[in-house]
Image (cartoon, helix red, strand yellow):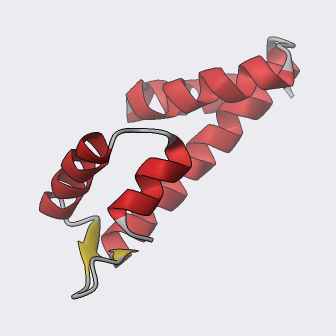
Amino acid sequence: MRATDIAESLQYTKASISRAVKLLKEKGYLYQDAHKMIFLTPKGEEKAVQIYERHQFFVVFLTEVLQLDPQIAEQDACRMEHVVSDSTFRGFQQLYEKMK
């Protein structure tokens, strides 16, 4: 995809996506080819998998433990996966394992 495709798909401004792409490139998570197509680097793929795994965990935790509506759990998991520290995340995992 190109930045413009992402902006259209997510309904964000092109400027917002361009800024995000620039930051992600600086962090080594993605690169763009000569045609401005965006690709994840190995580091970017690793980070994406980590975020997705955290997201999935939080959805399960919020729906099973807190018994939230799945749609609300999905939305909240999206926020939580990005802001919770690794140590807090491990704490959630340990709590979940104890509760099972």
The quarter holding residue 85 reads: top left
- Which residue is painted at 29% across and 69% down in the image? 30
The picture places residue 21, in percent across and down from the top left corner, at: 25, 56
- Looking at the image, residue 67 sits to the left or right of residue 33; the answer is right
- Looking at the image, residue 85 sits to the left or right of residue 22; the answer is right
The picture places residue 18, in percent across and down from the top left corner, at: 23, 52
- Looking at the image, residue 5 sits to the left or right of residue 18; the answer is right
Total marks in image = 0
- Which residue is painted at 85% across and 16% down in the image? 69
The picture places residue 37, in percent across and down from the top left corner, at: 35, 78
- Which residue is painted at 80% across and 11% down in the image? 66
Q: Is residue 20 above or below residue 79?
A: below
Q: Is residue 28 above or below residue 68?
A: below
Q: Nearer the viewer, residue 68 or 31?
A: 31
The N terminus: image quadrant: bottom left
Q: Nearer the viewer, residue 13 or 33?
A: 13
- Which residue is painted at 23% across and 43% down in the image? 15
Q: Nearer the viewer, residue 8 or 44?
A: 8
